């Protein structure tokens, strides 16, 4: 049963999304910037190196513990720019609103966008609004684009991981995806699991100041840490091994995932960065991250290897090994 | 709610101690084959990377205990038929959405406009019925004895609330008759069953007494954490080596001999045993659950006039042999070549608890990936 239509799986951020991109978008729109398959394109412009990116946000519910679709849209685009080492400068925002949307809800969302933009030091310089008839959209969709400036000497990309590198993360895994799921399904756990939605550019700046040889930065959003590391392994043609006991996972997130039969490695994050850099710099990077409010729980979670290129594996707590594949299917439809 | 206790059942040091004991126990002994009946066990075994750590003489065979995998093609086709009815919402668990029926899947029908909703429980489907009084809501009830009581509870709740537009297509299965069918088929040589903790919390350990005594088959009820499974295997080896065949409970924190009698009563109040067709195993007497007459108005097959559907099975699909434990996924000619989680030919590949899916996702990468212990 080969698919002939778009399924929800195609928006999961996992294997199906990857296949959609490689089947249609990448070959038909091919150029060196797009072919690099990084979170933003970096291009020379009148002596500066500009990072340029775009992203769309469709999330249910639109307001969730720890944020809403407005702040998420700013953080997501700021983070895509930050992953190329850029200092985010300006954003644009396009809104698709469904007929019947409560105007006070719209105001809450736009206020939150404005606040997030102020905090991140970016300006929303252009926008667009469309309204679709009731039932033809889902409350509100936001598309943002962003431009940032990449400092001289910084060159990051998913193709740069090297055997011997360390893999770090700035904090706990799967918070956003689990928060959205619990909120959407009305699952009440002990306390409320908060989204980790946050702008990462100042944390990235701290890492890049402390370490001269960072190879890859990537924010593990849809598809989670597992899918993002698979992309890096594939782009760099290296193997990546994770250590289960080192993965920082909140107890309530682990508990919720356990009950729902889900794996935090596949849950979305909106305030996390995976850092791949030479082992020798891992200590400095961890120190820099832990001094930053968004990196207090930073951890070394894995290593890059020459064998099994394109594969991510996990050494389990009991000493076994298993494959960590890309996300397949649709455990969490439309979470971000 | 948090699950703080989980870490204690994944302790690496304790695992290595039990593994060492198990290896000592098996040294010089004939090979033993144990079947984990339940898909949750299968997935836990693969997720923890347990298989390569076991003594080479202990072989684990995955059994038919994945409710999605054993759902007959005809039942998937019926679910799709319900979804094609006007003003009808089909509600079901996520796993079932992508399982191929004869021609299509619920996910593909949804992409073409059918109203198919993913829910986490039958209660969610009752709520959908309440929110959509102008629609018929059909819940596709699949699952073993762990799920069936919750569906029975949803039906009784819908009855109490006077909800008129809710019904259930019952494709539930019960496990012990399937275990007996496997053993009486004669083509499976086994040394014991690792029985599922969660089903047994409902049916009680006594449910396996017949299997243990009539077939001289050791049974151990185990939990789902890596240490539970290791401990359960150690108990199975002990029984087999001492020549005994009885029901032991490793999962004492959840399982009693009698089980959850309230859940059993609820299940018996709404459902009665019925013959059922298992994908791969065929018809098995009294292995399904049908509505009792007094609850017939909640039975989707009685509420709708379901026509006889022409069922088409992919003749190359070997899921049946995998479910019976006579073929390992790697031996299936379709595995990974044409059958993948993205394009599954059979339910064992599509279900998150399916044996082929677990091999594909966690363990298989051809001959070059050495998953043996490297540390």
Image: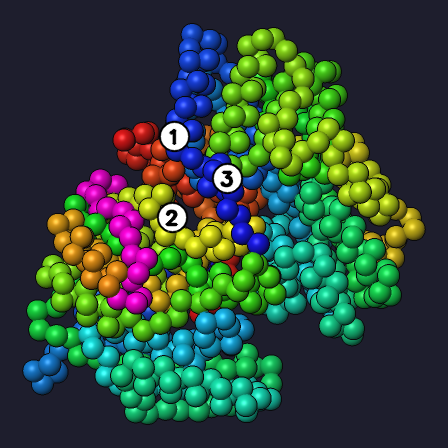
Question: What whole-number distance in Å separates the C-alpha atoms at marks 2 and 3?
Answer: 14 Å
For the N terminus of chain B, give its image quadrant.
bottom right
Number of the label disc, if any, that sits on residue A325: 2
x 73%, y 16%: residue: B214
* Residue A320 in picture, x, y percent from top left: 37, 33
x 40%, y 20%: residue: B20
For the C terminus of chain B, give its image quadrant.
top left
Q: Are marks 3 and 1 in contact (CB under 8 Å)?
A: no
Q: Quadrant of residue B209?
A: top right
Front residue of B112/A315: it is A315
User: At numbered mark 1, what does the secondary structure look like: helix, strand or loop?
Assistant: helix
Q: Are marks 1 and 2 in contact (CB under 8 Å)?
A: no
Disc 1 chain ID: B
Q: Would residue B54 be seen by someone viewing this image from the given angle?
A: yes
Q: Would residue B278 be seen by someone viewing this image from the given angle?
A: no
Q: Left or right of B135: which side holds A234?
A: left
Above or below: residue A49 compared with residue B217? below
């Amino acid at each position: 049963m080969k698919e002939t239509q778009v399924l929800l799986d195609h928006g999961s951020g996992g294997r199906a999304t990857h296949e959609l991109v490689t089947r249609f978008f990448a070959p038909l729109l091919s150029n060196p910037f797009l072919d690099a398959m990084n979170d933003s394109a970096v291009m020379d412009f009148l002596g500066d190196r500009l990072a340029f990116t775009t992203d769309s946000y469709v999330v249910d519910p639109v307001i969730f513990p720890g944020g809403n679709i407005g702040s998420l849209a700013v953080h997501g685009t700021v983070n895509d720019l930050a992953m190329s080492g850029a200092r985010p400068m300006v954003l644009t925002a396009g809104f698709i609103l469904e007929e019947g949307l409560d105007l006070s809800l719209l105001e809450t969302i736009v206020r939150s966008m404005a606040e997030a933009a102020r905090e991140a030091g970016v300006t929303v310089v252009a926008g667009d609004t469309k309204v679709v008839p009731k039932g033809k959209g889902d409350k509100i969709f936001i598309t943002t684009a962003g431009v940032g400036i990449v400092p001289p000497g910084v060159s990051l990309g998913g193709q740069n991981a090297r055997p011997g590198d360390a893999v770090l993360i700035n904090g706990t895994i799967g918070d956003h995806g689990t928060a959205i799921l619990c909120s959407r399904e009305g699952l009440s756990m002990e306390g409320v699991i908060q989204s980790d939605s946050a702008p990462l550019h100042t944390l990235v700046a701290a890492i890049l100041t402390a370490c001269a040889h960072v190879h890859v930065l990537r924010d593990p959003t849809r598809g989670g840490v597992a899918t993002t590391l698979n992309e890096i392994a594939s782009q760099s043609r290296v193997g990546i091994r994770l250590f289960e006991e080192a993965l920082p996972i909140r107890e309530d997130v682990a508990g919720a995932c356990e009950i729902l039969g889900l794996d935090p490695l596949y849950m979305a994050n909106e305030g996390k960065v995976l850092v791949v850099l030479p082992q020798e710099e891992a200590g400095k990077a961890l120190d820099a991250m832990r001094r930053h409010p968004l990196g207090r729980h930073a951890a070394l979670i894995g290593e890059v290897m020459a064998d099994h290129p394109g594969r991510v594996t996990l050494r389990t707590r009991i000493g076994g090994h298993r494959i960590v594949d890309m996300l397949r299917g649709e455990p969490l439809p439309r979470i971000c | 709610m948090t699950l703080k206790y989980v870490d204690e059942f994944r302790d690496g040091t304790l695992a290595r101690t039990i593994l060492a004991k198990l290896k000592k126990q098996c040294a010089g002994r004939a090979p033993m084959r144990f079947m984990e009946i339940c898909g949750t066990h299968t997935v836990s075994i693969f997720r923890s990377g347990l298989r390569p750590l076991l003594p080479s003489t202990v072989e684990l065979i995955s059994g038919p205990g994945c409710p999605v995998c054993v759902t007959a093609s005809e039942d998937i086709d019926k679910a799709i038929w319900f979804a094609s009815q006007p003003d009808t919402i089909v509600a079901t668990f996520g796993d079932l959405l992508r399982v191929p029926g004869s021609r299509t899947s619920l996910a593909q029908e949804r992409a073409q406009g059918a109203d198919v909703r993913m829910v986490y429980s039958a209660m969610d489907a009752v709520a959908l019925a309440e929110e959509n009084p102008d629609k018929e809501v059909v819940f596709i009830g699949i699952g073993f004895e762990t799920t069936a009581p919750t569906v029975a509870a949803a039906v009784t709740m819908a009855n109490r609330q006077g909800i008129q537009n809710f019904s259930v297509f019952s494709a539930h299965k019960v496990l012990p008759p399937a275990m007996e069918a496997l053993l009486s088929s004669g083509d499976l040589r086994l040394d014991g069953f690792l029985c599922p903790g969660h089903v047994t919390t409902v049916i009680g350990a006594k449910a396996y007494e017949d299997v243990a005594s009539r077939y001289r088959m050791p049974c151990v009820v185990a939990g789902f954490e890596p240490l539970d499974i290791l401990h359960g295997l150690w108990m199975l080896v002990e029984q087999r080596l001492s020549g005994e065949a009885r029901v032991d409970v490793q999962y004492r924190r959840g399982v009693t001999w009698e089980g959850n009698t309230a859940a059993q009563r609820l299940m018996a109040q709404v459902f009665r045993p019925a013959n059922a067709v298992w994908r791969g195993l065929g018809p098995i007497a009294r292995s399904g659950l049908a509505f009792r007459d007094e609850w017939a108005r909640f039975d989707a097959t009685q509420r709708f006039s379901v026509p006889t559907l022409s069922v088409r099975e992919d003749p190359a699909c070997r899921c049946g042999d995998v479910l019976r434990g006579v073929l390992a996924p790697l031996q299936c000619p379709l595995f990974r070549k044409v059958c993948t989680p993205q394009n599954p030919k059979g339910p064992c590949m599509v279900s998150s608890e399916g044996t082929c899916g677990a091999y594909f996702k966690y363990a298989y990468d051809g001959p070059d990936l050495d998953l043996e212990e490297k540390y």
